[in-house]
Amino acid sequence: MAGFYEALGPERRDQIAAISMDMTSIYRDATIDAVPDAAICLDPFHAMQWVNQALAAVYRATPLAELGLTGTRAFKHARTALRTGAERLDDDQRQLVARIRRRRYGL
């Protein structure tokens, strides 16, 4: 990556305002060194991958039996509800998210 930035030359590097990339340190570090004023934007694929990993970790930390959820189907239903925007939840999903929230935060 450093070679790429070197090949661009200083004039073209100065024109870079934003860069989309994954956060592999080899890309990130070379970019910070070569174009320190450019905004680094996460590519959508990796950003969503991290969000889904965090969501799965929260879900796994919630005791399903205490919520009345058991089995793969219940997991998929809860996962879908947690990934859906609040404005698009149906009544069942809204109630499930509320139960998970109450359990998670002791409400």
Image (tube, rainbow, N blue to C red):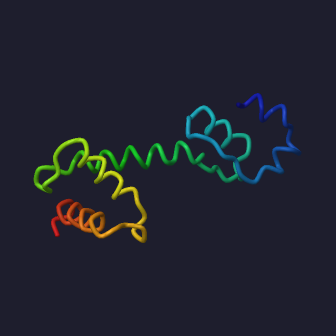
Residue at 43 percent across and 64 percent down: it is: 85
Residue 66 at x, y percent in the picture = 10, 54
Residue 78 at x, y percent in the picture = 28, 54
- On screen, 11 above or below 100? above
Asked whether 64 or 27 is in front, the reply is 64
User: Left or right of 81: which side holds 34?
Assistant: right
Residue at 62 percent across and 50 percent down: it is: 41
Asked whether 102 or 69 is in front, the reply is 69
| Residue ranking furthest to the right | 11
Asked whether 23 or 73 is in front, the reply is 73
- On screen, 65 above or below 8? below
- On screen, 103 above or below 63? below
User: Left or right of 6: which side holds 61?
Assistant: left
Which of the 4 quarters of the picture holds residue 4?
top right
User: Left or right of 55: which side holds 75?
Assistant: left
- On screen, 45 above or below 5? below
- Which quadrant would the N terminus be assigned to in this image? top right
Residue at 39 percent across and 56 percent down: it is: 83
Asked whether 55 or 75 is in front, the reply is 75
Residue 76 at x, y percent in the picture = 30, 47
- Which quadrant would the C terminus be assigned to in this image? bottom left
- Figure label count: 0
